[in-house]
Amino acid sequence: MTTTISDPRQGAMDSIGARIRYLRETKGWTQERLAHEADVSKSFISEVEKNRRNPSAEKLLGIATVLGASLDFIIKGEGMTPEGPPPPVTIPHELAEAAEEKGWPYKHVIAVLEAWNSLVARRNKDGRPAMTKKNWIEFYDKIRSHLE
Amino acid sequence: MPQLRRASSVIQIARDLGLSGNDPVGAILDHCHAKIESWGNGFKGTLTLSRLHQLVDDHLDLQHVVVTTNDELDELIREQIAQRELAAAALRDEFANGTEAITFRLRHARVGMRRNLSVIDGRGDRAVRVYFGKRHESSHLLSMAPTQLDLVFRRTHAVKNVAEEQLMDRISGEIAFYRPLFKPELDRLQRRYGRPCFQLIEDLRNEVCSDASWYATGLATVEQNDVPALFLTASYAAKTADQGHPGASLALRASARGNAAARRAGLIIPWNYRIPPGSVIYDVFHSPSTLSEVHADERLGIWTASNGSRLRDLPIHILVRRYGNHVVAIVTLN
């Protein structure tokens, strides 16, 4: 299924050029910056954004990589809708204990849990214990100033 | 390897991926290889090693950010917090406490942007590990079942254990120097020299994998070689049985990684054998002023262990040089 995504600032993103332009501007980059990062000329980026040039698969992959964007989105404009609301959560026992002891507001507990759940992997030679009450308190302290 | 096969975390990863059998490590590696191969086959352009890495990251919905200064790290944290990615607030402490790279799922990624962000600490001494670090983070996602990223209470790789780390390093090695792309280039360039050598490592870095460290490229050059060869690093250390014991006597030993051809030919140097004073490796190690590459023809039979046993007396050719604070050598059969 192909979904044409539009953005109020950009209009319909119905071409490769329009989507590259949208992604570039989302990052706050100029055409010069994108050209430099992707190791192509500025005129190349300009032509592509105006749909006057069909970039090769290699060039598109390079552009997607430096923009941190999905190649599928650039080529087809599909599949990259924003992530929906999270499903209902269960608060781990250790986190609940920490929250009760410290008197954290409920919305903070949810925010802490969401932040922790967003960690997918970490590379640490020493390893890490599973989350204990103490770990939750330490993690909360790291992000607390950003919770309001 | 046998220990890794039996590790419960490794068995669990295989199970999550729907893999069965007696060798979960081999099954996971095959699984990752099949995925990469299918992505490569679906790409409509010409693949190089660096493009393959880009393609793998694209399929994993992953972008890497390497921070090389404190200011870059601060700026990244500010940017992510501004986009309500609160996990980023923990980055400074994570990196200060031994974490070298961390991957998190962006909760508020903009339309069209990749949703997994790996932040790699490339400051100071950690810079040399960035290339491998990127592949390591990709390995975590590559070895997760798709549903694990969608569940709220999923098994993540955020809580680590040693076996899982070793497994990720194995997968990283497969991706970093992906054999179907690296080996033909290795064979092509090696025709200039006939056997693995230090200049070949430089050539490969110049032409095939410019982002990879010299050391990692050296290991891959030997491991994927059809010529029997060892890549070794010399250091003073205790033998295995004495490690961790205070007062254990130290000897100059070799940490040697060999290829399949070397194993078949009996070209093996176990850790417990000492680098003999008659070897050029010993000489270079004890001559810090030797900066250039040195080579010599020797016999492996001069290597001994503390119990008096000797290595098989094979004729060998040794190339040795300094690499930072280390002494490394490439050993081939004569």
Image: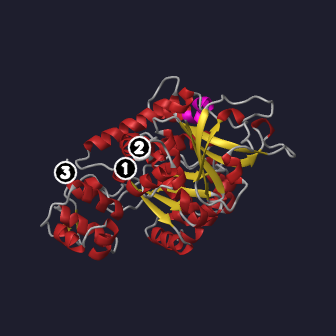
Q: Sequence order check: which comes first, mark 1 or mark 2?
A: 1
Give x and y (percent) for residue A39: 31, 67
Which residue was labeled with disc 3? A2
* Left or right, B263 with reference to A129: left
Residues packed near mark 3 inside 10 Å, few (<14), some (14 to 19) or many (20 plus): few
Both labels 1 and 2 in a single chain? yes
Dots 1 and 2: beta carbons under 8 Å? yes
Label 2 is found on which chain of the structure? Answer: B
Q: Secondary structure at mark 3?
A: loop
- Few, some or many C-alpha atoms within 10 Å of disc 1 (few <14, some 14-19, many ≥20)? some
Would residue B90 be found to the left or right of residue B116 on screen?
A: right
Within 10 angstroms of label 2, few (less than 14), some, or many (20 or more) residues?
Answer: many
Going 51% across and 56% down the picture, which residue do you hit? B213
Q: Is residue B3 magenta?
A: yes
**Quadrant location, the N terminus of chain B:** top right
Which mark is drawn over residue B49? 1
Q: What whole-number distance in Å separates the C-alpha atoms at marks 1 and 3?
A: 31 Å
Q: Residue at x 34, y 71 (%)?
A: A27
- B195 displayed left or right of B295: left
Image coordinates of residue B134 in percent, x first then y, are 47, 54
Q: Where does label 2 land, which residue?
A: B178
Q: Quadrant of residue A30?
A: bottom left
Element at badge 1? helix
- The residue type indicated by label 2 comes to Tyr
Specify the principal SS of the magenta part: helix
The residue nearer to you, when weighing A131 against B4, is B4
